[in-house]
Image: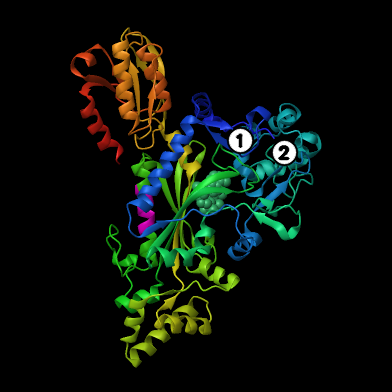
């Protein structure tokens, strides 16, 4: 069950994370368990700061979003209604030779990361691949790296026939032909050994468990693969108790579990992880039309800073993309490292109207941090169908607006909605039933869903913060400084307090007193051992933005030395001035 070696570009970071107590392999003393990670003393502070910042931005500082903390195991019917039981799967292939399982849609990506892939790239890049070179590799190094590749198992027979087709082949075709036993049909090779893969088959990613003492299929339940479904299932309870009405949101953070076929890239794809999800419920566009006369779309180039009553789903969706990008920037990811990807119509789920992935440029490639989907009324409608409980809201202003329409306007509105729905492939009867309810002030809300991962954000912040630089000390000695340049908002420790020396009781007591005061406000660290320079280096590696030294002058005038992690500059200031400075920076 050992975890495979992490991607090499991450090696220095992985080693720092272990050395400094950010991230450990789960169950390490028993050889580890693949796809599971533990967060050490600094890692859990980092994660907690990410979650606190998200909660503050999404819930505490808004009047239109409330929170939820639901259970991880829920009634299995939830997963039937949501579609997870039937369709939450990844394509999985098995290598016919080495028997390893892997995600069929990631084998090329995996190949790009390993020694076999590097060798193939080199052979292919040699121009029109020379038969002799390929044969030599297959008879030599290939035996160790890709023993089950067809061309390695039968170098003379295969390469003699394939020489012509290899020349000018694309990279994938080149490798696929070397993997082919029949020399004609390209075969997708196993990235571990070069062997032939089975046809992909769907593999459901939900972890199963049994509820109660009886191991009976009737007692099967699932660990949630996302936090979002509980929000839909509790929608009516929250609506009834929170005094909210659309547009409003319900936010939830917590653990999710996916039995990923191939967990990889360190913590990026784990089997247990945390999500931060918002379901933001909005009126259907037809309701906006009745209430405001017209729906504002992106073509109207609306100002996205303050939500307006007349916004349609499209504007709300873009608003949330902007809000979320702003949050990533606010906690320290540079704008240039964030890559929003607008999914193409063919990539969208059948119920989704739009979906944007916010991606980050990780050292192993540009990958998703968060998905922001406009999911129509799909989820609530599914739960209404499966539970038999109404998911409708009653919107009094809507009913009043509808009552003001005269007969002609009413008929025109109904016909327009029916025409619009049928043009989008929906039934006229369904459309008429929807309008009848709408005119009575009732509808199932639509939803915009920004769904982010805590662990991926922690990894992005670590990748972004990691730096090695050459510094020269007072004595002219040059050394490499490893530093994590976290934004102070997410840094695990905000300030470290050092007594200059520990064997001067008065000075020591003063430093403890200051430490105690600061600790009440922020995460602080006490370090009394070693030269000040060494203590600074330790804090640089932990990403601590400020170090404070209490020295002899402190006893005379109450000032301390504050050292800035990034500039390495020092300043003297009083403790009240320091508190004011940090308050300003850390309030965010
Ligand atoms: P991917 O395509 O990378 O598997 P996804 O599109 O399936 O991700 P969503 O279902 O949209 O992901 O989940 C929302 C967020 O939850 C993701 O953007 C990511 O941050 C996080 N997440 C999903 N799966 C994992 C995982 N296996 N490990 C860590 N984080 C995850």
State the image coordinates of residue 108 (x, y, percent, origin top left): 62, 43
Q: Residues within 10 Å of mark 2 (few under 14, many from 20)?
A: many
Left or right position of 519 against 256 = left
**Ligand 1 near label 2 (Cβ, under 8 Å)?**
no
Left or right position of 588 against 375 = left
State the image coordinates of residue 446 (x, y, percent, origin top left): 45, 68
Q: Earlier in the sequence, mark 1 or mark 2?
A: 1
Tag 1 residue:
121
Judging depth in this view, the residue of 440 and 183 nearest the camera is: 440
Q: Which residues are magenta?
A: 319-326
User: Which numbered marker is on residue 75?
Assistant: none
Task: Give the structural element (helix, strand or loop) at label 1.
Answer: helix
Vertical placement of residue 246 versus 20, above or below: below
CA gap, disc 1 and disc 2: 14 Å
Kindly identify the residue that appears in the image at 35 percent across and 49 percent down: 57
Judging depth in this view, the residue of 222 and 309 nearest the camera is: 222
State the image coordinates of residue 395 (x, y, percent, origin top left): 38, 75
User: Looking at the figure, which quarter contains the N terminus?
Assistant: top right
Give the residue at the far bottom of this rendering: 407
Viewer-nearest of discs 1 and 2: 2
Judging depth in this view, the residue of 316 and 497 nearest the camera is: 497
User: Looking at the figure, which quarter contains the C terminus?
Assistant: top left
Give the residue at the far left of this rendering: 557
Q: Quadrant of residue 520?
A: top left
Tag 2 residue:
194
Q: Main secondary structure of the magenta part?
A: helix
Kindly identify the residue that appears in the image at 53 percent across and 27 percent down: 18
Task: Give the structural element (helix, strand or loop) at label 2.
Answer: loop
Vertical placement of residue 389 versus 156, above or below: below
Judging depth in this view, the residue of 78 and 422 nearest the camera is: 78
Left or right position of 398 against 205 = left
């Amino acid at each position: 069950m050992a975890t495979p070696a992490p991607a090499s570009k991450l090696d220095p970071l992985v080693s720092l994370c272990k050395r400094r107590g950010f991230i450990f392999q789960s169950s390490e003393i028993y050889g580890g368990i693949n796809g599971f990670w533990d967060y050490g003393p600094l890692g859990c502070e980092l994660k907690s700061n990410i979650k606190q910042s998200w909660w503050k931005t999404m819930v505490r500082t808004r009047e239109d979003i409330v929170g939820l903390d639901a259970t991880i195991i829920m009634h299995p019917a939830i997963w039937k209604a949501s579609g997870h039981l039937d369709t939450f799967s990844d394509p999985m292939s098995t290598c016919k030779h080495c028997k390893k399982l892997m995600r069929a849609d990631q084998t090329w990506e995996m190949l790009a990361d390993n020694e076999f892939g590097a060798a193939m790239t080199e052979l292919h890049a040699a121009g029109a691949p020379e038969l002799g070179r390929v044969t030599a590799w297959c008879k030599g190094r290939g035996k160790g790296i890709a023993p089950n590749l067809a061309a390695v198992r039968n170098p003379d027979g295969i390469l003699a026939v394939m020489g012509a087709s290899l020349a000018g082949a694309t990279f994938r075709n080149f490798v696929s032909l070397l993997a082919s036993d029949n020399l004609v049909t390209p075969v997708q090779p196993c990235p571990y050994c070069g062997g032939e893969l089975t046809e992909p088959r769907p593999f459901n990613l939900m972890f199963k468990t049994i509820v109660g003492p009886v191991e009976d299929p009737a007692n099967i339940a699932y660990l949630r693969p996302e936090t979002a479904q509980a929000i839909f299932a509790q929608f009516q309870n929250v609506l009834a108790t929170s005094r909210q009405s659309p547009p409003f949101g319900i936010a939830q953070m917590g653990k999710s579990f996916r039995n990923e076929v191939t967990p990889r890239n360190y913590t990026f794809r784990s089997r247990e992880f945390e999500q931060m999800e918002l379901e933001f419920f909005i009126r259907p566009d037809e309701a906006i039309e009745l209430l405001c006369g017209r729906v504002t779309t992106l073509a109207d180039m609306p100002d996205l800073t303050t939500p307006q009553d007349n916004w349609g789903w499209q504007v709300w969706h873009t608003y949330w993309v902007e809000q979320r990008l702003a949050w990533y920037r606010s906690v320290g990811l540079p704008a240039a490292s964030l890559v929003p990807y607008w999914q193409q119509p063919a990539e969208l789920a059948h119920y989704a109207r739009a979906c944007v992935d916010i991606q980050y440029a990780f050292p192993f490639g540009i990958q998703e941090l968060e998905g922001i989907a406009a999911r129509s009324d799909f989820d609530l409608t599914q739960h209404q169908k499966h539970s038999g409980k109404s998911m409708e809201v009653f919107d009094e202003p809507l009913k009043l607006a509808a009552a003001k329409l005269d007969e002609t306007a009413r008929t025109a509105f109904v016909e327009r909605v029916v025409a619009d729905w049928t043009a989008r492939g929906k039934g006229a009867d369904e459309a008429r039933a929807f309008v009848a309810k709408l005119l009575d002030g009732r509808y199932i809300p639509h939803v915009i869903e920004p769904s982010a991962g805590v662990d991926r954000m922690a990894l992005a912040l670590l990748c972004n913060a990691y730096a090695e630089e050459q510094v020269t000390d007072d004595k002219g000695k040059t050394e490499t400084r490893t530093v994590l340049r976290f934004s102070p908002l997410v840094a695990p420790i905000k300030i470290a307090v050092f007594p200059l020396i520990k064997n001067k009781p008065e000075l020591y007591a003063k430093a403890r007193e200051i430490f105690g005061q600061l600790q009440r406000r922020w995460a602080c660290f006490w370090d009394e051992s070693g030269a000040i320079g060494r203590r600074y280096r330790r804090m640089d590696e932990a990403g601590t933005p400020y170090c404070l030294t209490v020295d002899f002058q402190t006893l005379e005038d109450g000032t301390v030395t504050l050292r800035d992690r990034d500039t390495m500059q020092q300043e003297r200031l009083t403790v009240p001035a320091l508190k004011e400075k940090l308050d300003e920076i850390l309030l965010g």
